[in-house]
Image (spheres, helix red, strand yellow):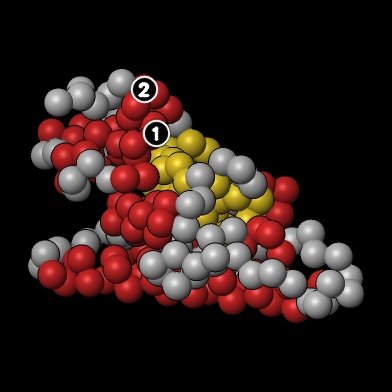
C-alpha cells in the first residue's frame, strides 16, 4: 500500500488515508489503526517538544495551564503536514466524578471547566494585562471535524491548583484527538467566535504571523496587508 509523503517533521501528510484501507491491500484494518495511532502519538510528542523548548528558551513560567502555547504548536505542526487546522477557543468541561460519585448536592462540582467569561472581574483584569480571560484553546481539523487537544494530561493537576479539588473519577486521556461523536461522555468543547477572534489576535501579537493563520487572515481581513 502506498504511503503518504512525509513533511519536514518526518510525519505523514495524510494519516486519514489509512482509515479506509480495504482488507487485503497490504495492511489489515487493525494495523491501519495502529499506524494512525502511532502517527498521532508521534505528532503529539513533537508538539510537546516544541512547546517545552519555546517555554524554556523564552523563560516563560505558565502558572495555570499552557493551552495557549500548546494550541499554537499543535496548529503549526499540523499545518506543516498540510492538515486544514483551525485554532478554536471557548469553553471546555471534563467530568471529575463518575455519576455514581455525585452526591447530588448543589455545591458539588462534578466537572472541572474553563468557561469563556470575558465579563468576569478576573477575566477583565487578565485582558487589561494583555492576556486571555478564562477560556480554553484547542485545535480542530476542518476536513474530518476532529478535535485535537494535547493538554488534557494537565487537567487533574490544574483542578488541584486552581480549585483545590482532587479527581476521584477516571482521569482524562493523555491527549484528545477524536471526532465529536466519539467524545468521552459528559465532556464538552464549545468554541465561541469572540474567543477564537481574541486568540487569533493574541497569536498575531505573540508570534510572527503564523503560517497556519494565513488563509484565515486573508479571508477575514483581520491582518492589514503591507
> Is 61 on the left-hand or right-hand side of 2?
left
- For the C terminus, which image quadrant? top left
Query: Going 23% across and 41% down the picture, which residue do you hit?
Result: 209
Q: Position of residue 38 (x, y in %)?
A: 59, 76
| Image-quadrant location for residue 196 | top left
- Which callout, 2 or 1, points to the residue nearer the camera? 1
Residue behind mark 2: 220
- Residue 212 in the image, given as x and y percentages of width and height: 36, 45
> 194 and 216: which one is in front?
216
Q: Residue at x 11, y 39 (%)?
A: 129
In the picture provided, is 6 more to the left or to the right than 33?
left
Q: Residue at x 43, y 27 (%)?
A: 193
Q: How far across and how far down the image is residue 181, in percent?
A: 72, 48
- Residue reaching furthest to the right: 24
- Give the spatial CA distance, label 2 vs label 1: 8 Å
Q: Secondary structure at mark 1?
A: helix
Q: Earlier in the sequence, mark 2 or mark 1?
A: 1
Q: Is 21 placed above or below 108 here?
A: below
Quadrant of the rendered image containing residue 216: top left
Q: Secondary structure at mark 2?
A: helix
Left-right relation of 68 to 3: left
Q: Is residue 45 visible?
A: yes
Within-10-Å neighbours for mark 1: few <14, some 14–19, many 20+ = few
What number is the disc on residue 215? Answer: 1
Q: Position of residue 214 (x, y in %)?
A: 34, 36
Classify residue 125 by image quadrant.
Answer: top left
Q: How many marks?
A: 2
- Judging depth in this view, the residue of 27 and 207 nearest the camera is 27
Amino acid at each position: 500500500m502506498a504511503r503518504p509523503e512525509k513533511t519536514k517533521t518526518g510525519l505523514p501528510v495524510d494519516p486519514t488515508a489509512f482509515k479506509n484501507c480495504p482488507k487485503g491491500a497490504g495492511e489489515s484494518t487493525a494495523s491501519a489503526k495502529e499506524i494512525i495511532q502511532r502517527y498521532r502519538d508521534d505528532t503529539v510528542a513533537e508538539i510537546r517538544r516544541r512547546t517545552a523548548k519555546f517555554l524554556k528558551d523564552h523563560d516563560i513560567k505558565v502558572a495555570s495551564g499552557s493551552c495557549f502555547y500548546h494550541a499554537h504548536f499543535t496548529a503549526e505542526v499540523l499545518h506543516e503536514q498540510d492538515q486544514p487546522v483551525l485554532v478554536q477557543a471557548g469553553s471546555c468541561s471534563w467530568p471529575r466524578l463518575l455519576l455514581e460519585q455525585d452526591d447530588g448536592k448543589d455545591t458539588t462540582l462534578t466537572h472541572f471547566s474553563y468557561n469563556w467569561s470575558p465579563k468576569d472581574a478576573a477575566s477583565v483584569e487578565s485582558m487589561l494585562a494583555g492576556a486571555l480571560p478564562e477560556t480554553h484553546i484547542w485545535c480542530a481539523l476542518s476536513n474530518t471535524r476532529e478535535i485535537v487537544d494535547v493538554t488534557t494530561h494537565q487537567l487533574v493537576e490544574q483542578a488541584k491548583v486552581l480549585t483545590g479539588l482532587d479527581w476521584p473519577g477516571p482521569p482524562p486521556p493523555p491527549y484528545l484527538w477524536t471526532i465529536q461523536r466519539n467524545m468521552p461522555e459528559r465532556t464538552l468543547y464549545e468554541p465561541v467566535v469572540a474567543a477564537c477572534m481574541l486568540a487569533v489576535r493574541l497569536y498575531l501579537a505573540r508570534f510572527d504571523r503564523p503560517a497556519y493563520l494565513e488563509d484565515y487572515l486573508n479571508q477575514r481581513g483581520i491582518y492589514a496587508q503591507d
